[in-house]
Amino acid sequence: MRLLVVEDHVDLLQAIVEILADEFTVDYTTNGEEGLFLALHNIYDAIILDVMLPGVDGFEIVQHIRKEEIKTPVLFLTAKDSLEDRVKGLDFGGDDYLVKPFQAPELKARIRALLRRSGGLTMNQTIRYGGIELLGKEREIIVDGQPVKLTVKQYELLEYFIQNKGAILTKEQIYDRVWGFDSEATIAIVEVFVHQLRKKLEPFGYHANIKTVRGIGYMLSDE
């Protein structure tokens, strides 16, 4: 799962990244304008925003992404502990609020709660699609009772398909979600990995469930 952290205090930013890196892929920046750019051009499972940022503040970032109908859950971080600031952040489209200083377990618990509410948390859960089971904690896959070996990216690709079964996903959406905006790979990598994933699922018949939508991308059919 991929998170974005926007925090202008470098030491705190590094600490947050270290706290989260054992469970999540983390993109980060100290600059509000860059944070807004990343939030608009990548697909994240959650965004952690400092309120007071140079250039564009956290409230402005969340307003911009909500106008673009980006529904990614947002957790605000701030040193301010006034009721007015908490209300403002939630009214602008934030989902939760954490006041500095905070402890690592609380930060991770708040993020897990956001992900559960948004339906995005599978890191320690099992998700199923027909006879396919994705074991989130172990990052393993079982198909019709048999273990199947997938690379990390193949696993993330299948997970993304299952989370969005029945929906058409563009190649750009898949690329941003699985590889990230700063990847050195080209978008052609999506087609390569879809082919590889189909080959892994072919012995069980599930390869046919990954449909090509010509000129757009792919769709995992409903069970």
Image: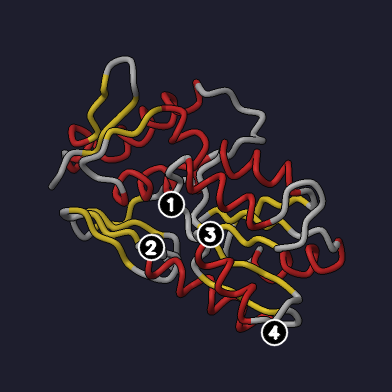
User: Mark 1 vs mark 4: which is more N-terminal?
Assistant: 1
Q: Is residue 92 left or right of residue 16?
A: left
Q: Amino acid at mark 1?
A: Lys
Determine the CA span between mark 4 and mark 3: 25 Å
Give the quarter of the image for residue 180: top right
- Most extreme residue toward the top is 215
The residue indicated by pointer 4 is 103
Q: Amino acid at mark 4?
A: Gln
Q: Is residue 222 left or right of residue 150?
A: left
The residue lying at 43 percent from left, 31 percent from top is: 193
The residue lying at 33 percent from left, 59 percent from top is: 134
Q: Amino acid at mark 3?
A: Phe
User: Are the two marked residues, 1 and 2, in contact with CB atoms closer than 8 angstroms?
Assistant: yes
The residue indicated by pointer 2 is 118
Q: Amino acid at mark 2?
A: Ser
Determine the CA span between mark 1 and mark 3: 12 Å
The residue indicated by pointer 1 is 71
Determine the CA span between mark 1 and mark 2: 9 Å
User: Are the two marked residues, 4 and 2, in contact with CB atoms closer than 8 angstroms?
Assistant: no
- Residue 92: mark: 3
Mark 4 closeness class: few <14, some 14–19, many ≥20 residues within 10 Å: few
Q: Is residue 124 left or right of residue 36?
A: left
Give the quarter of the image for residue 216: top left
Query: Regarding mark 4 in the picture, which secondary structure is present there?
Result: loop
